[in-house]
Image (spheres, rainbow, N blue to C red):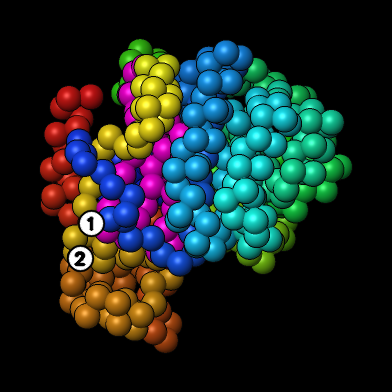
Amino acid sequence: MQNYEFQPEVYTYPTARSYKRLDGFSISQQEFTNEINLYLHIPFCRQLCTFCGYLKTINSDMLRKGYISALIKEIEMYKDVIGEKKTISVNIGGGTPSLLQPNELGEIVDELKAINGSILKTAKEVSIEATPESVEYEKFKEFKDLGIDRVSIGIESFADNEIRMAGRHNVGSMSSNAVKILKELHFSNVVCDLMIGIEGQTEKTFSDSLDELIGLDPDTVEVYALGIIPSTVIGKHNPQGFMSNKEKYECYEIARKKFLEKGYFQSCHNRYSKLSEGGYLQEDTVFRGASLIGLGAGARSYAQNLHYRNSFELLDGKAAISRYISKINSGNFAVETGIVLSEDERMRRYAIGNIESLDLLEFTNLFKANFSTAFKDLYEEMLSSGCAREAGNKLKLTAKGLLFRDLIARQLFSSDVEALEGAYRLTA
C-alpha cells in the first residue's frame, strides 16, 4: 500500500489462469447450490478495444447464427440442472450481446423458459451488456418486453480522444444519448461503467467524465482501473500515456467522494448505486457462494466442487468459438479446463468474496476454523493498518480497506494457485 502497488480487480477465485486441462467432464458429478445464477456469453463485437482481454471476435451474421444455435443446444444439455434449480439471476455478457437482434435474444429466452417455466419469475435480475452505439430505442424496448430489466453499458470515458485511442466508437454525445434512451425506457437498473487509467487519461479528464455521468443520473455505476493484459493491443505494444498506480488510486478516491455526495451508496469497493439491492445481484450472490452456470464459448461455471471453462483461446477468439460450436453440435460438452476446489480453496474463495464485510462467526461455522487464526498475519495487518475494523461478529473494511480491497484479496491466494498462475504466464 505504501508503494501504491496496483492489483487488477479480483472478481473470482481461483482465477481462470490457474485452470488446467480437464478430461472426462461429467455434469452429474457437479455440486450446484439450490439457487443458481446463469451467465450466457455472446462473443461478437463491432470493434476490438485495445484493452479488452475477453473472448470475442468481429461480428459475423453467419457465425452468429451458428453460435446461437449451439448456445441453445448447450442450454438443453443443462436442462436437468436449470429445470430443477431456482434461477436467481441471468446475465447475458460478452463481447457485445446487444448486437443480437430481438428475435435472436427471443430464441434464447424461449429456450430457458421451455426448460424452466418460472425462470423469469424467480430471477430477480435479468441483465444484458451493451455498448453505447448499439443502444436503439425500438430494439431495447423489445429487449425489455423479453424480460431484460438491467442494462450494463460500457461508456468507459466521455473524452472523445480517449475513446478513439481505445479503439472504440462511442464518442461522448453517443454515450449520453444511450443513457437517456435507457432511462426513457424505464429499465429497473441502468448501469454505467467508467474506466480509470485508459490511454491518454488524466485525473482531470477522469473527473470530468464522472461529472458528465453523474449528470445523466444512472442507477448504478461501476468504476474499474485498467489492468494491462499481455495479449491485448496495449499489452503487446506498450504505448505511453498511462496513469501511474498512485494516480489510479487517487481517481478511485475522487469517484468515491463525488458519488457519495450525490446520494449514491458504496455497495462494494468499485460500485455505487441508488438501489437498495446494490446494483449487481449476480456478482454479489456468486461472491456469497451461490453457483453459476456459464454457457457459451469461454464461459466459466462455478460448482461447489469444481470451477470449469468452455473452449477458450487467449489470442484467437474465432478459433475457440468454432471449436465450441463443433463440440456442442457433436453432442458433447465444450468444457476444456478447470480446477478442483479443495476445502482450503473453498475457504479462501469465501474469504475473498466476502472480505468487505466478513461474518467471522459464519466463517467459523462453515470451515471449522477462525479467520484470525487461519490468516493470522493478514488479519492483524488489516486491523493495525486501519484497513479493517471489527463490528460485532463482522470484520469490515474501512474506506482505506475498500480502496486497497483487491490488494488485500490477493494476499488470500494459496501458494498452489500462485504457482499455477505463474506457470500460465510463462506459456501465455
Question: Which label number is shown at residue 341?
Answer: 1
Dividing the picture into quadrants, the one containing residue 400 is: bottom left
Tell me the residue at 57%/51% (across/down). Answer: 115
Residue 355 point in image, percent of width and height? 37, 65
Question: Which label number is shown at residue 248?
Answer: none
Judge by depth and name the residue closer to the eye, 168 or 261. 168
Residue 151 point in image, percent of width and height? 68, 43
Judge by depth and name the residue closer to the eye, 214 or 47. 47
Residue type highlighted by circle 1: Leu
Direction from residue 190 to residue 51 in the image, left or right: left
Direction from residue 167 to residue 403 in the image, left or right: left
Q: Secondary structure at mark 2?
A: helix
Q: Is residue 415 magenta?
A: no
Residue 91 showing in the rendered view: yes
Residue 179 point in image, percent of width and height? 76, 37
Q: Residue furthest bottom?
A: 392
Q: Badge 2, how many Cα within 10 Å: few under 14, some, many 20+?
A: few
Q: Is residue 314 magenta?
A: yes
Tell me the residue at 71%/26% (across/down). Answer: 101
Residue type highlighted by circle 2: Glu
The residue to which callout 2 is attached is 343
